Amino acid sequence: MKKLSETYEELGIAFTFPIEIRNADGYLTYCEDSAGFWYKRKYDAKGNKIYYEDSDAIWCKYEYDADGNETYYDNSNGSWCKYEYDASGNVTYFENSYGDTEGTPRSELRPAIDTINMYIAKCKESLAYHKHLNNAMACQKWGDRLKNLESTKLVIKHIDKDI
């Protein structure tokens, strides 16, 4: 068994453990110790680790959004996690293979915005109707509802800038 500091020669090439191989960007892509344990990593163009594998048959996959936030993680034991973020990079939704969830997924935000837009249009119609009748109490009521709906819409748009 080789020691970590020992040099090993095979096929005329001398190796000193641990063996480390880096890509052109300086990221560690392969490492092997003197006991034969090895691991390798792959990176995307932005330097985010997208894959890990080792000699113990462990692997992990990672996915990222355009801002470099991790959006998905999967591994060899069947565990996975999904993440969604707001425009500031804060996690707005989390879900994992164990059934844990937190927040609201984007897939549910779009229908919510569509519904809010429908109610905003109805509030504006009712507000205009009651203004025409000079009904101050009804105008106040519909005006307050309109403000609440528009505030709710702003909160959802903060969660997902693309909605």
Image (cartoon, rainbow, N blue to C red):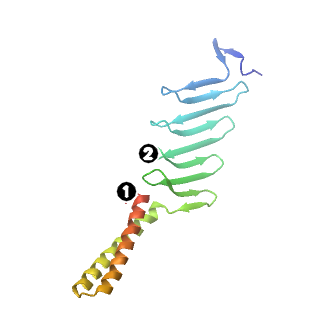
Is residue 138 in sight in this rendering?
yes
Q: Which amino acid type is shown beneath numbered disc 2?
A: Asp
Residue furthest toward the top?
Answer: 12
Where residue 58 sits: x, y (%)?
65, 41
Q: Where residue 50 appears, x then y in whole percent?
A: 53, 40
Is residue 113 visible from the viewing direction of this image? no
Residue at left 58%, top 61%?
101
Question: Which quadrant holds residue 45?
Answer: top left
In the picture, the disc for residue 133 is: none
Q: Badge 2 local density, few (<14 within 10 Å), some, or many (20+)?
A: few
Q: Amino acid at mark 1?
A: Asp
Above or below for 137 versus 36: below
- Which quadrant is the C terminus positioned in? bottom left
Q: Quadrant of residue 9?
A: top right
Question: How far separated are the C-alphas under marks 1 and 2?
Answer: 14 Å
Q: Is residue 65 left or right of residue 129?
A: right
Residue at (53, 50) in percent of width and height: 72
Q: Are marks 1 and 2 in contact (CB under 8 Å)?
A: no
Q: Which residue is mark 1?
A: 162
The disc, 1 or 2, on the residue closer to the chain's N-terminal end is 2
Residue 67: mark in rendering: 2
Residue at the front extreme of this rendering: 136
Q: Is residue 112 above or below residue 7?
A: below
In this view of the protein, which residue sits in the foreground, 92 or 47?
92
